Amino acid sequence: MDMATFAQVLDSTLRLATPLLFACLAGLISERAGIFDIGLEGKMLAAAFLAAAIAYVSGNVWLGVLAGIAISVFMSLIHGVASITFRGNQLISGVAINFLAAGITVVIAQNWFRQGGRTPSLTGDARMAPIDLPFADALADVPVIGPIYGIFSGHAPLVYLAFLCVPATWFLLFRTRFGLRLRAVGENPAAVDTAGISVIGMRYGAVAICGVLCGLAGAYLSTGLSAGFVKDMSAGRGYIALAAMIFAKWRPWHAMGAVLLFGLLEAVANRFQSIEVMGLALPIQVMQALPYILTVVILAGFVGRAIPPRAGGSPYVKEH
Amino acid sequence: MNKRIPHWADVTLVPLVSVLLAFAISAVLIWAIGESPWEAVKLMVDGAFGSSYGWGYTLFYATNFMFTGLAVAVAFQARLFNIGGEGQAAIGGLGVALVCLYIPWPHWTLALLGASVGAALFGALWAFIPGYLQARRGSHIVITTIMFNFIAASFLNYMLVSFLRPQGSQDPSSPRFPDAAALPKLHEILGLFGIPFSKVPPVNISLLIAVALCFAVWWMLWRTRLGYQIRAFGASEPAAQYAGISPARITIVVMLISGGLAGMMALNNVMGEQERLVLNAVEGAGFIGIAVALMGRNHPFGVFLAAILFGFLYQGGAELALWTGIPRELIVVIQALVILFTGALDNMVRVPIAKLFSLRRAG
């Protein structure tokens, strides 16, 4: 592999990791508060559609992003009502949200644009423009530093935002009172309740943040990574994000490492038909399945055990 | 606090109200995209039940959903959520293809027997790993079965492209199965009794197998020791353990049965319809099993009825897409709403109904 190809692969790794990172942090915050969320995929898909649709109609990508966030938060609230207020099964609710998004995006896209369930291609201001980091042009010809700097420069704003969300999430969870309470709600809600803090309120808060982040993931997918929405465009990324979250054992910095690894796998799978590792030709399907296989291995506890927040998945019932 | 609902209302009224809510919201959606819900219902009923052609497709889809619905329902009885029906059915298809392609069957009856074993075995094997990991290593079965759906898709892709695809073919699919492995269609079976039936739909003898399995699963759950253990385990794990039931053993056995049932769906779609293995043959039927099991209250008879309902929705939805501007994905929306109301928002429906009953008792 020559230097230029290498740089290209890393460049696309960053871009492919971005939606994963948003969604992974979204799931992380939700699950830290004790709400399992396998509906990341659906929220991302719904946000991708509405972001592209509104960006196309208004010609302004940022209005699109806001619309994407709004629909994703709305779907998060459905999940919240089902799993917090009505104490329903969080996993079933997540499955329902995934299907709801898969169906309704195509029905509405067909109704609005009549292009077989897609939005028209986005151009100009309806698409997210890349930001060139300062001195990117000047440094481009400098050996070694130039290409490396080039990998980090020239991405859409949401790429940088996603990576800024990593320290922000860490700070929120581990250095603020809100974060302490949020984690406590996921481990021992009864104790939080005894302290006079609303478990329901904390959980709704976490679910709403999760919605915002999934909205950003989806909006980036359709306006940054691609130029428009197509049917099922999230293509399992919500589940890969879930896998990354488990892989990272619900920790923000590790989550960044996990999504970069999974992003790299996807970038390599996109670029090459098969890849040789130590004289062994790995078929492309192995690269595609690797995130899932790794997650199963981690879950099985063969390489360090992944233990979810203790109260995860169970609704909180106040004692009488 | 714990308001009781009479058993009959629990198994009929609660799911019925949930489904009506799902249909009502779907009707609003149809109206919102400028179509008439009433016309849509008429088209769907006519398309699904108005002719033996429609019936044939309805029953074909229903057959798929009986297999996957039973798979999810059996797991739910042990309080295990098997989302992996999609992958298990896909791998079951691989089992069917290998059995049909590499064993020279003299007659379809033997081929059917062999394919059933292959499908069930492969499906069960695919469910065994998540089951084992849950039982012995405590890995969450929901997450592992989701991951196994994706691994199944990649694995099947690899097998088709690298091994099963005939030389020189661009299409990632296996060769056609030999004629001796072709299953009799429903019109041939009904023809024996002189009943005319459309020759077009792919509904075949697997329908009878699915119905027989509904009965067999009921028998297993309510008339055998294993079934009792499964239900006891589902009702209370500590109590079951105290009664000497091994949680690990039940978890693994239930997942084997569940995966086997999902795998057997391949008899219908791979052996009965396509007569070869193609990519993505399952087309979401594994996931519809979740909706079917929830609606059918995890009871085989309920699964049977819910599978027919979803068969109707599928066939009716196809007709709808053909004649109106409503795409097929509307069915996915209805499916999602059914899962939401019967599964996640169960309490929202149940609590008001329970209140009504307690009012009646008091008054």
Image: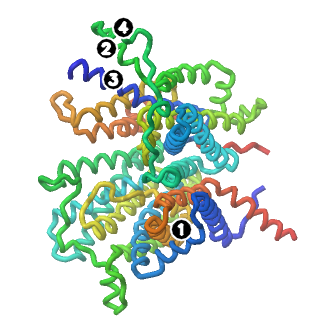
Marks 3/4: CA–CA distance: 21 Å
Q: Quick one: label 2, few (<14), some, or many (20+) residues within 10 Å?
A: many
Q: Amino acid at mark 4?
A: Ala
Q: Residue furthest bottom?
A: B194
Q: Position of residue B227 (x, y in %)?
A: 49, 65
Q: Is residue A23 above or below residue A319?
A: above
Q: Is residue A229 above or below residue B328?
A: above
Marks 3/1: CA–CA distance: 52 Å
Q: Nearer the viewer, mark 2 or mark 3?
A: 2
Task: Kindly indicate the quadrant of the structure image that contains residue B99.
Answer: bottom left
From the image, tell me which residue sits under label 1.
B299
N-terminal of the pair, mark 2 or mark 3, is 3
Q: Could you tell me which residue is drawn at 41 percent across and 71 percent down?
A: B213
Q: Amino acid at mark 3?
A: Leu
From the image, tell me which residue sits under label 4.
A138
Whether label 3 touches label 1, CB < 8 Å:
no
Whether label 3 touches label 4, CB < 8 Å:
no
Chain of residue at mark 3: A
Chain of residue at mark 4: A
Q: Nearer the viewer, mark 3 or mark 4?
A: 4
Quadrant, the C terminus of chain A: top right
Task: Kindly indicate the quadrant of the structure image that contains residue A200.
Answer: top right
